[in-house]
Amino acid sequence: MKHPILLTLLLSIFFIPVRMTAADKSSGSIMQSLRAAVVENPDSVLTVIDGMEREGDMPIEAYQANLLRGLAYNEKRMFSLAERYARRVLAADSIAAHPAERLNALTLLSVAQNFFGNFQGSIESSTEAMEIARSTGNTAAEYNILTTMAKTAFAMGNRHQGYAYLASIIKSGESSTEARVLANVSAAYGVRIVELYADDRFDEALAEGYKRLALIDKIERVGGAPEGFTDQQRAYAYARIASCAERAGKPEEARKAYDSFMLTAYAQNPVGRAYIMDYLLDSRQWAKVLEFTAPLHHILARGDTINDDYRSLLISDGRAYAGLGNYREGYGLIQRASDIQDSLYMREKTTRAQELASAFALNEKELELARVQSESQRRHLLMWLAIGGSVALLVISLLIFKAYRESVKRQRIAARQIDELWSLHQMTPPASDEDRDDFRLFSDMQRRIIDDELFKQPQFNRDAIIELTGLSRGKVSQLIEKFANLGVNDYINKLRVEYSVQLLKEHPDWTIDAIAESSGYVRRATYYSHFNRVFGITPAQYRKEAGRTPVTDSQDK
């Protein structure tokens, strides 16, 4: 074992009645040892703390024990317990004198709140944590928190704010000469590129990719980064540049980025090569996809294959086999991926149940400690806990039921509005003579796009419309903005999601992935984002309200 103090503690609790010396029982050294062990051995840390508590000889402060418990449960992804102990740390009278521990507790609380969808609470906790990071001069922690806030903003649909947080990190951090700070700036670039890609802003994402490469060069010059860090960061950057360039219609630039990716040390191992998969799929290099994924099957098969990584691997292989014309094999792999998604859903429910069981067991343990201290107080406490718990459960149940009813109501209204908009899809010609010629041009353009289903092509864009109509770039943009009240990209995406509504109605047995691909989307996540942006609900929610949700889409609910 790497930590002798932790070993001494474990021996004293489980094997022999060892008494630690005063030096061994130093609060700082014990806290440091347990903190070092919590990532790899969270259960052992919890056991040690429980043992010290039972012995009544706690060598660390109560807020420190609660922080260690919160960190351990965070590693175990038991976020309700992590939140509970983070709040206990923050409620301690002495925590104000320990800003580093308070910063850790607020970060734990923010992560837990974000996990449970309490985005506003997560932002408030992150804001308070950021104030501490700034006041203590911990710039790396500040940027890490800002990145978390950006991800939360994107999850809430507040994309402008998310981009603003990332811009703040990049603008203020690029001039730093500290490797740890620059690493957080590089991470912000990574999130920014991913979100620009999701918004179909491929040229902007491409430009950001080259800026990230320049930043990585600076990290290398500054020095101090862990071995292999800059090589790995370059691999990430080149992989994103390749996929963005391919989607932006720049295949030569994409190929050059791919070649640069392959020159990195990170790309020489199968796990590293997985990061170039988006480019290979976008560029339809089906045989290369299968070549790169083949060793990953052996690696992932060594452990539990019920995970998102293995599911993504099967989907990539399925698309590759279908691209090569082997539709039977491709369909079989996609079906296996769907089965894994169902298993993940069931596992999530089981994990949640285990977490609740752990919480219940923890409550029992705390009540038992109270009983040892005072039997009379225990009876009184149990009585009020039962009453308070019942009232709280009733209130929570009512709030959940009310929220559910409101959600269902909003979904039904949105679904009804989608059907009404679909039935009113025809446009009325303008009354003004001077607009009729433009309307005729727009109507003819839209008719040809819809009749020939050109929007279903993933690469269909403004240049394709120009080539189709012979109109100038400015004229195409003017017509679409004038009669569709949208930009060109949003107009094309609107045609795709409107077409997907028709598919959802006509093919209730198709999966959401099949609907997305048939509507011109390469990725399910992009389809979800555009559908929700246009209609205010997800495709799965619309299908459910339309009364035709198939079993194969249960994971989308």
Image (tube, rainbow, N blue to C red):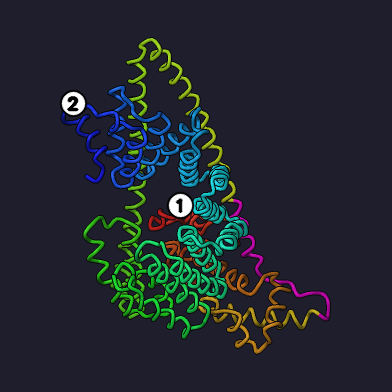
Residue 499 image offset from top left, x and y in percent: 55, 69
Residue 43's place in the image compared with 437, above or below, is above
Q: Nearer the viewer, residue 262 or 414?
A: 262
**Residue sitting at 53 percent across and 43 percent down?**
118
Which residue is at the far top? 376
Between discs 2 and 1, the one toward the N terminus: 2
Distance (Cα) linking label 2 and label 1 = 54 Å
Percent from the top left, x then y, of residue 50? Answer: 30, 30
How far across and how far down the image is residue 414, in percent?
Answer: 60, 54
Does residue 8 appear to the left or right of 226 in the view shown? left
**Number of labelled discs?**
2
- Relative side of 429 to 198, left or right: right
* Range of magenta residues: 413-434
Kindly state the secondary structure of the residue where label 2 is placed.
loop
Residue 209 can be seen in this image: yes
> Which of the labelled discs sits on residue 17, or is there none?
2
Residue type, label 2: Pro
- The circle drawn on residue 557 is 1
Horizontal and vertical percent position of residue 496: 55, 70
Number of the front mark, 2 or 1: 2
The residue that appears at 25% across and 70% down in the rendered structure is 295
> In the picture provided, is 455 more to the left or to the right than 305?
right
Along the line of sight, the residue nearer the viewer: 316 or 235: 235
Magenta includes 202?
A: no
Judge by depth and name the residue closer to the eye, 317 or 370: 370
Q: Is residue 421 magenta?
A: yes
Check disc 1 and report its element: helix, strand or loop: loop
The crowd level at tag 2 (other Cα within 10 Å; few <14, some 14-19, many 20+) is few
Place residue 399 in its image quadrant. top right
Q: Residue at x 63, y 75 (%)?
A: 488
Question: Looking at this view, is 449 or 205 the one in front?
Answer: 205
